[in-house]
Image: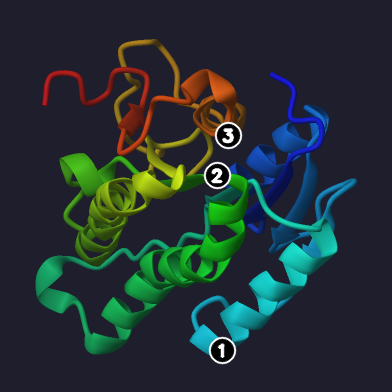
């Protein structure tokens, strides 16, 4: 898939999944701006994505540098490890702000540019939001579930503007805390960030021009029997 001439913003490149997604867009010809850890041949922008004013300044800076925006990938993430009955207000704020809040504000402030280009939103979250997760991930699962339903709302609201919104729900990745002690999925191995990145590129591409509101679980078949 060629993204030559396409302008892409990716958040969450301080994690392996966000970094792999940004690298895949760069490798396929896109002009990319990232928030998080620097990615080779991509512009890096800074700012607090959990604060509305700072987030707006960050997106304005990225869009100005790119000369517009065709794709936004929200891959910022934070995982908690507390059972439901032990979650504090501070834990909840961290779980919500670390993923859902950043995705909401980033897309909100990118929306005018995406409407102008008839662009694409890709929200990246965990399969826990769709299927539930271990007992120690209650706040995280709730926050990721919010991203899934936000994706559906965005598809309904902005389809009239030619803007598509889809969501990738990733299963546990090789080497991650979630994969440790977890059963190997039916496909015979845990996923890699690169496995997920290819699906994100498809969602953002013209090959998925009629796809919006889709929630795609990429987990090697882990939850197929759920």
Residue receiving disc 3: 193
Q: Residue at x 69, y 64 (%)?
A: 36
Numbered disc 3: secondary structure:
helix
Q: Is residue 50 above or below residue 11?
A: below
Q: Residue at x 64, y 39 (%)?
A: 21
Query: Quick check: 36 left or right of 91?
Result: right
Q: Which mark is residue 136?
A: none
Q: Residue at x 74, y 39 (%)?
A: 6
Along the viewing direction, whichever of 146 and 116 lies nearer the viewer = 116
Residue receiving disc 1: 53
For marks 1 and 2, the one nearer the N-term is 1
Along the viewing direction, whichever of 143 and 190 lies nearer the viewer = 143
Query: Quick check: 38 left or right of 34?
Result: right
Using the rendered image of the protein, determine whether residue 48 is visible from the camera's viewpoint: no
Residue 158, x across and y down, in percent: 37, 52
Residue receiving disc 2: 118
């Amino acid at each position: 898939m060629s993204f030559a001439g396409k302008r892409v913003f990716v958040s969450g490149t301080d994690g392996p999944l966000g970094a792999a997604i940004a690298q895949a867009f760069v490798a396929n010809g896109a002009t990319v701006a990232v928030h998080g850890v620097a990615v080779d041949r991509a512009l890096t922008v800074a700012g607090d994505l959990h604060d509305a004013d700072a987030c707006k300044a960050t997106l304005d800076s990225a869009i100005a540098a790119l000369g517009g925006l065709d794709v936004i990938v929200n891959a910022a993430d934070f995982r908690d490890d507390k059972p439901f009955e032990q979650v504090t207000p501070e834990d909840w704020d961290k779980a919500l702000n670390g993923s859902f809040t950043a995705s909401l504000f980033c897309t909100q402030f990118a929306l005018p540019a995406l409407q102008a280009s008839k662009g694409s939103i890709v929200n990246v979250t965990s399969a826990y939001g769709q299927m539930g997760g271990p007992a120690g991930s209650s706040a995280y699962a709730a926050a990721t579930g919010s991203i899934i339903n936000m994706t559906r709302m965005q598809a309904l609201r902005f389809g009239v503007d030619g803007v598509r919104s889809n969501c990738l729900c990733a299963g546990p990745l090789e080497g991650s805390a979630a994969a440790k002690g977890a059963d190997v999925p039916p496909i015979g191995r845990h996923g890699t960030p690169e496995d997920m990145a290819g699906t994100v590129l498809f969602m953002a591409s013209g090959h998925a021009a009629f796809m919006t509101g889709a929630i795609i679980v990429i987990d090697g078949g882990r939850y197929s029997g759920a």
